[in-house]
Amino acid sequence: MNLLLRLEQLFAQRFTDLEFLSLQDVDMRCSELGDKVRHAYQPDAIVGILDGGQYPSIKLSEQLNLPLYFISISRPYPLIGQLELDDIFLLKRAFTQLYRPLPQLLQPFTNDVQDMRVLVVDEDTGTGQTLGLADAVLRERGAAETRHATLFSYVGHFQPHFAQERVRLRPNPFCKFRKRLPWCKYSPHYEAYNAFQRAYASPAADSTRCGLQFAHSVSS
């Protein structure tokens, strides 16, 4: 593993007050989010935003028994050696105080969502720009309607249609939100998440899953 990433893990896990959620924690949150959706909306399909929305969209598609597609959208952060700035805890926080790039569609979305009601899933939302870009792409592909579901939303920021938890951000510019999800590379649960990804995308997995060719293509 990259030495810089090891140092990041050590710092984040031992010298900050971050709360690292396990896959089991996220499963419970996804179940609660799925219940909210089930009682208020009847989508025809789910579209997960890679990478942050991949795991929750998989869980929601299983819970709601809906077809699942992926859309590859990310904010382009610079590389530091072999690591994206997005993976480096302190440098990313410093960088985003000065500049926050707009989200970009990284690969064409080619799935057929004509006349479908689509639930767009991501881990969280702040400005709503990523979800807005996903909406625009899906409308171009013929979607009849889009709604949004995220694990977290933030008080005073863009609000999705469904959120498992609404959080008030802290004033600390370097750590406004304490919780970190398992796909964060400095999480102690990152290896467990990697194991899930490998199993999900393996040849033994259900070959009818949609969009798996994008499963490891981008960090969001």
Image (cartoon, helix red, strand yellow):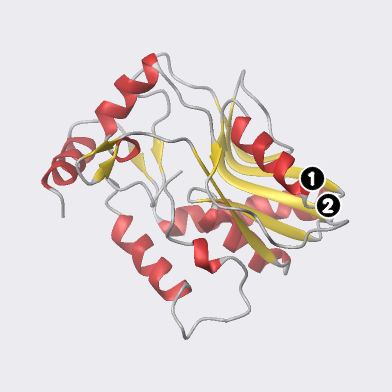
The percent coordinates of residue 193 (x first, y second) are: 38, 61
Disc 2 crowd rating (10 Å Cα; few below 14, some 14-19, many 20+) is: some
Label annotation for residue 28: none
Q: Are marks 1 and 2 in contact (CB under 8 Å)?
A: yes
Q: Quadrant where the N terminus lies?
A: bottom left
- Identity of the amino acid at label 1? Arg
For image coordinates 81% across by 56% down, the residue present is: 43
In the rendered image, the vertical position of residue 9 relative to residue 96, given as above or below: below
At numbered mark 1, what does the secondary structure look like: helix, strand or loop?
helix
**Res 11 → quadrant:** top left
- Identity of the amino acid at label 2? Gly
| Cα–Cα gap, marks 1 and 2 | 5 Å
Q: Is residue 29 left or right of residue 117?
A: left
The percent coordinates of residue 150 (x first, y second) are: 61, 43
Q: What is the total number of numbered labels drawn onto the structure image?
A: 2
Q: Is residue 198 left or right of residue 40?
A: left
* Residue 106 visible in this rendered orientation of the protein: yes
For image coordinates 61% across by 30% down, the residue present is: 129
For image coordinates 66% across by 64% down, the residue present is: 68
The percent coordinates of residue 195 (x first, y second) are: 35, 68
Report which residue position mark 2 lands on.
142
Disc 1 crowd rating (10 Å Cα; few below 14, some 14-19, many 20+) is: some
* Residue 172 visible in this rendered orientation of the protein: no
For image coordinates 56% across by 55% down, the residue present is: 56
Q: Is residue 178 left or right of residue 206?
A: left
Q: Of residues 114 and 65, which is closer to you in this image?
A: 114
Report which residue position mark 1 lands on.
139
The percent coordinates of residue 159 (x first, y second) are: 68, 29
At numbered mark 2, what does the secondary structure look like: helix, strand or loop?
loop
**Res 146 → quadrant:** top right
Q: Of residues 171 and 77, which is closer to you in this image?
A: 77
